[in-house]
Image: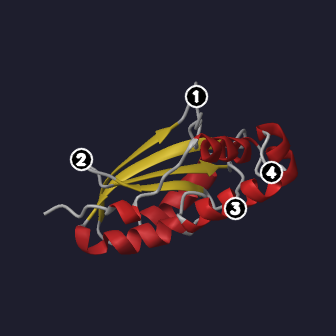
Amino acid sequence: MRNRKSEKDEINIDIIDLSILEHLRNNSRKPIVRIADELCISEATVRSRINKLRENGILKEYTIIKGQGVGFKVIISFKVHLYYIDEAINKLRNFRKIDSVFHTTGEQNILVIGNFKDSNDFMEFMREHIYTLKGVRNIKTFMIDRSHKDEYIPKLI
């Protein structure tokens, strides 16, 4: 049986919410007053909409995107025995050099994207952190040669 959301649990997002999110995506430090002026709505409306988006888990944090133009980006994929997968994910989430951790389907069940200063930095990370995770096998690594499009957050409108 599927776990369905009731109408009460559904989150309704309209064009105003999307516009606010787009402003914040482009500049998370943009003053609420400027957003309100540019959208021709009141500051109180923008503030309450932002609060609603936070409460509903849509707007989770204001952040910078790490790793743009520094060193090189690497994708690491590997298989972790299901008994150890939560432990591995929790460890990987805490490394500063790691931007993204995904639990995936297919041959490998973990995909990690990270940024490293150089190949020595990358190999040290692999030796000290990836190879020491319990239940890891079938590791594949991909060093990004060129990026043709790299957006962590898709455009909303």
| Spatial separation of the CA atoms under disc 2 and disc 3 | 42 Å
Q: Earlier in the sequence, mark 3 or mark 1?
A: 3
Q: Which residue is mark 1?
A: 149
Q: Which residue is mark 4?
A: 42
Is residue 43 toward the left or the right of residue 90 in the image? Answer: right
Q: SS at mark 4?
A: loop
| Spatial separation of the CA atoms under disc 4 and disc 2 | 48 Å
Q: Quadrant of the C terminus?
A: top right
| Spatial separation of the CA atoms under disc 3 and disc 1 | 34 Å
Amino acid carrying label 4: it is Ser
State the colouring used for the structure image.
Answer: secondary structure
Q: SS at mark 1?
A: loop
Number of residues whose C-alpha sits closer than 10 Å to that of mark 2, classed few (under 14), some (14–19) or many (20 or more): few
Q: SS at mark 2?
A: loop
Q: Which residue is mark 2?
A: 106
The residue lying toward the viewer, choosing from 143 and 65, is: 65
Number of residues whose C-alpha sits closer than 10 Å to that of mark 4, classed few (under 14), some (14–19) or many (20 or more): few
Q: Quadrant of the N terminus?
A: bottom left
Q: Quadrant of residue 156?
A: top right
Give percent across and percent down for residue 82: 24, 68
Give percent across and percent down for residue 127: 49, 62
Q: SS at mark 3?
A: helix
Res. 132 visible in picture? no
Q: Which residue is mark 3?
A: 48
Comparing marks 1 and 4, which lies closer to the viewer? 4
Comparing marks 2 and 3, which lies closer to the viewer? 3
Res. 25 visible in picture? yes
